[in-house]
Image: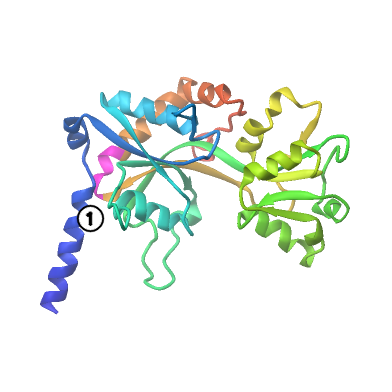
Amino acid sequence: MKILRLSVLFALLIVFANARSIEEIQESGYITIAVYKDFPPYSFTENNEIKGIDVELGKLLAKSLKVEAKWQLTGSDESLADDLRINIWKGNLIHKNYADVMFRVPYDYDYLRLRDKQTGELETDMVSIKGPYHSEKWVIATHKEKIPKITTLGIFAYHTIGVELDTLADNHLTGFARGLINKNVKHYFHFKDAIKDFKEGKLDAIAGLKSQLEYLLDFNNNKDKFYMTTKIPQAKSHWDIATAVHTSYRPLSYHIDGLISENYENGNIKKIFEKFGVNYLPPIARTQQ
């Protein structure tokens, strides 16, 4: 038992050694920021330069600490808990890379209290999630000439709709009315392929994140061609997005929360979203304060 306790303590010391305080970050001269790779308009590479909404916000964070921003481009694992473990509190299993902060983490009351089914522990126990900076939605875009308006998903018994595989939108569409519209739901491994087929008229509609559809369809300049819903009918599809840091260094999360609050109040965050053609939705958590 004593050996077991010592091994657990040693493992915790390794984890805590990975996390860094504000002072350690400033002494090193850089902050490592995890963002999702190839995920426009939030983070993507163009002409060998990393760009996006989360990248702009990360640069604001680095500037506030007077350090350089270093980017950790991460893929999406099987669950958000896996993403947080790999990027924030444990590191990559092979390279042991970790980040000081991760952007685009759901700030959701239910998720913050979600427990692991096997251990019973909070999935967010090792991270501090703060600084909500916008709201996200699942929506549907259509070709106006084919579908000028949507009041029910039943319309897709007669029209095709594309969706990325294994997303919440996919689960809802395929589960609607006991599979009523399944034959017309077209699945894609990569969302960009769905966008391509939609633009070419091979799909009547496409379901996805509001911000991604606005950016990838240049929606604000194509409202004469495309219609977009405010949500997916019969589905809960509205939540806040925030940042995560290791729970042992909460002062960093408080600093980020203050920085986000300041730039939310002065309109800078809205301007960043508009720069990428996205109509900004304020975080629910901030509008209810």
Q: Is residue 83 magenta?
A: no
In the image, taking residue 229 as reference, residue 65 lies left or right, namely: left
Question: Looking at the image, can residue 228 be seen?
Answer: no
Q: Amino acid at mark 1?
A: Val
**Residue 58 place in picture, x, y as percent:** 39, 31
Q: Which residue is mark 1?
A: 15
Residue at point 61%, 25% (across, down): 277
Q: Relative to the observer, which residue lies in front, 205 or 111?
A: 205
Q: Secondary structure at mark 1?
A: helix
Q: Residue furthest front?
A: 47
- Provide the major secondary structure of the magenta segment: helix
Q: Which residues are magenta?
A: 248-252
Q: Residue furthest bottom?
A: 1
In the image, taking residue 163 as reference, residue 270 lies left or right, namely: left
Locate the N terminus by quadrant.
Answer: bottom left
Q: Residues within 10 Å of mark 1 (few under 14, many from 20)?
A: some
Question: Looking at the image, can residue 103 be seen?
Answer: yes
Q: Relative to the observer, which residue lies in front, 261 or 62?
A: 62
**Residue 195 place in picture, x, y as percent:** 69, 40
Residue at point 70%, 29% (across, down): 219
Residue at point 16%, 57% (across, down): 13
**Residue 11 place in picture, x, y as percent:** 20, 62
